Amino acid sequence: MDKKILGITAGVAVIIALSVLVLNLPTSEVIIPQKTNEKIGLVINSPTPSVSLQQLDEIFTDASSTGIGRSNVYLFWNVIEPVEGNFDWSQSDILMGLNEKNNLKVTLYFSIINGETLGPFPKWIGKPTLNGINQDELVNTLDMILSRYHIVDSVIIAGETESQFRYNEAFIPVYKELFSNVYDRIKEKHPDVQFGNSFALHQVLDKNLKHIVNDLAIGDFVAFSYTPTDILNEIVKTPDDAIDDLEKIFEIIPNKKIGFFEMSWSTSEFVGGDLISQKNFLEKLFNFYAQNESEIEFLTWYRYYDQKEDSCVTKQQKIGDQTIVVGGGSSMGTSEHVIERLNHYICNAGIVDINENFKPGWNEFKNQIQMTN
């Protein structure tokens, strides 16, 4: 099952939430934790799709009280530039403003590749193949975003990259040339911003796709998402097993910084999770971070809040004006059985439950960050 939906869901949830907001950003004094760690992040989401701006402001303040120093922001090209040359900043300004208010750096997910899907692209671009993507248009859009939001210090251009090239390895050189050209031109204007691609480690290991990661270990860092699950989206690893998986990254990529883009452990018993295993994984994850900090670009936990069951994944995800089909490489990967389990996994991956009660993982997360500062 293609886990690209983790990134999509976070972006969609925020877009839905912000679509109902009509207030201006709060003018209250910026509250900054006494100490923060810019390498440690949290995907900040709301427990329900629709929230007021005041509620969202409080959510960011509460999440930032842990001492995190960054968060992920998911911007899709078709949402940010629906008409060529005309940018819609209404949603991103709110999100970036809340991050800036809470002294958070941002890892930007801007998907040219989104697992098996290319884009989503604006309608005015159409549905280009990899070698049909206009580099000038891409560079211009990224330049506009980075010039507007100076808190963005890292950009992921492709996510779940291994899924795109698993059966299309002949197109790897095409993408490498595209990435290299865009990278060189953007770096001239934004030399302090780091660029890379992201891979789903669990899929890379399960499907023996290490060679694709090696071929595409380009840019300033190589990023990974991770879930301790099998192809049915059920948890099959212990926390120790999961750390062993993370250790394998340094064997695959020995000479580049590593970004841990979306690290998660669900507490849903339906898929084999529980509160204690999440807490234990967080403890071991931070021990792993401490031992390898010099090799790590950032480490971000997915995510802050749980959400209502069956609200996290549908077979077809709406992103702006486009629909993205969630699927894997087989009929098993697109079955209701797998979608159901993915829903349970993602909806319960937070460290605060749907009733806004802190899980043991919250205290572990907060305490561990304080020890790193």
Image (tube, rainbow, N blue to C red):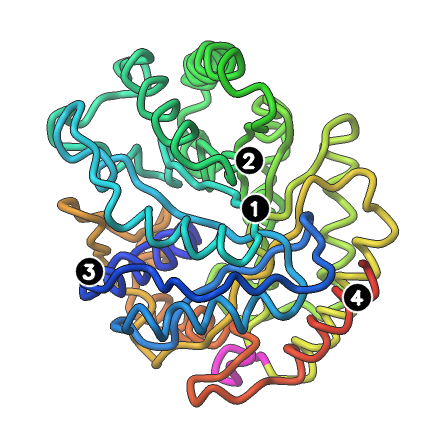
- Which residue position is annotated with label 3? 19
The magenta stretch is 267-273
- Decide which of tag 1 and tag 4 comes sooner along the chain: 1
- Front residue (pair 338, 286): 286
Kindly identify which numbered label has been placed on residue 216.
none
Residues marked 1 and 2 touching at CB (< 8 Å) = yes
- Decide which of tag 2 and tag 3 comes sooner along the chain: 3
- The span from disc 1 to disc 2 (Cα, nearest Å) is 9 Å
- Front residue (pair 177, 2): 177
- Which residue position is annotated with label 4? 284
Q: In this view, does 43 lie above or below 76?
A: below
Image coordinates for residue 38, horizontal then vertical, percent = 67, 49
Is label 2 in a helix, a strand or a loop? strand
- The span from disc 4 to disc 2 (Cα, nearest Å) is 25 Å
For disc 2, the neighbor class at 10 Å (few under 14, some 14 to 19, many from 20) is many
Q: In this view, does 174 lie to the left or right of 225?
A: left
Q: Can residue 170 be seen in this view?
A: no
- Image depth: mark 4 or mark 2 in front: 2
- Decide which of tag 3 and tag 1 comes sooner along the chain: 3
- Which residue position is annotated with label 1? 105
- Which residue position is annotated with label 2? 154
